[in-house]
Image: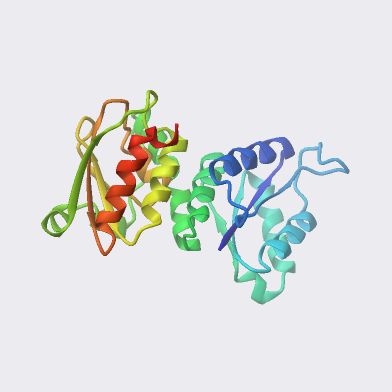
Amino acid sequence: MVNILLVSHSHQLAEGTAALARQMASSGALEIRVAAGIGDDHSEIGTDAVEILEALNDLTENAEVLVLMDLGSALLSTDMALEMMDEEMRKRVHLSPAPFVEGAIAAAVQANMGASVRDVANEALQSLAAKQQQLSTSVTPEPAPEAEKELEPEAIQATGQTLTLRVPNPTGLHARPAALFAKTIRAHDAKVTVTNLDGENTPHKITGLISVMLLSAKQGDTLKILAEGPQATEVLAAIQALADENFGD
């Protein structure tokens, strides 16, 4: 299991981000903690290394921890907290350079699926990709080599099974249905690649929330879904059932 710690100068910012993440990943097993602000009521802007240390000690008791920080002294305070930790517990802490809000939400969804800390960290790092694509910016993060290799669908087409469906949701596959889509896939022993035939027509291996959102799937778009593996039939049936229920909307 992977827990998440949000370190910010602003208690309001951190609590708001945590609330968004918990709404997207409402699992009792996943713990999202906040160490933010200073002063008796945390209303002053700043970060406290001792508070970060206490949170890390709690969160690493039975899990790995991904830490997302906002700016400057948040990184310094986290480093100070790490220096004060027990060496063995410190090995369970992983600092992420991902964007604070988007990274936290992406990480929470991925952690909620039971992913490894490496997969959770990678998902957080890719969290801006969907926004960059939607806004047509020129700065796009390079996909990890493993993910890039998985994008080629030829092998899946040769041995896998196919499902074609239209997106029924009025607002398309926005964050909540995208998270449910990814969670459904992760629950099966199968590799799934999806192509939006009415979008960029580029296949995406579905590994988490961000890879679904990169499809930019709008209402009426046709998705071609390729699945391979021991539970290929089951995962396609589950996806069809999900679509029949408007992906939870």
**Residue furthest right in the image:** 40
Q: Residue at x 62, y 44 (%)?
A: 70
When asked about the image quadrant of residue 139, the answer is top left
Number of marks = 0
Q: Residue at x 29, y 60 (%)?
A: 231
Q: Quadrant of residue 53?
A: bottom right
In the rendered image of this protein, does residue 96 appear above or below residue 71?
Answer: below
| Residue 107 in the image, given as x and y percentages of width and height | 51, 50
Is 75 or 169 nearer to us in this picture? 169
Picture quadrant where residue 94 is located: bottom right
Q: Is residue 137 visible?
A: no
Q: How far across and down, in percent of the image, does residue 93 sit?
A: 61, 64
Q: Is residue 188 visible?
A: yes
- Quadrant containing the C terminus is top left
Across and down, in percent, residue 103 comes to 52, 45
- Left or right, 171 with reference to 80: left
Above or below, 94 against 19 in this view is below
Q: Position of residue 173 (x, y in %)?
A: 38, 33
* Quarter of the figure that contains the N terminus: bottom right
- Front one among 227 and 21: 227
Q: Determine the residue located farthest toward the top in the rendered image.
A: 170
Residue lying furthest bottom: 88
**Residue drawn at (21%, 30%) of the image:** 198
Q: Coloured how? A: rainbow
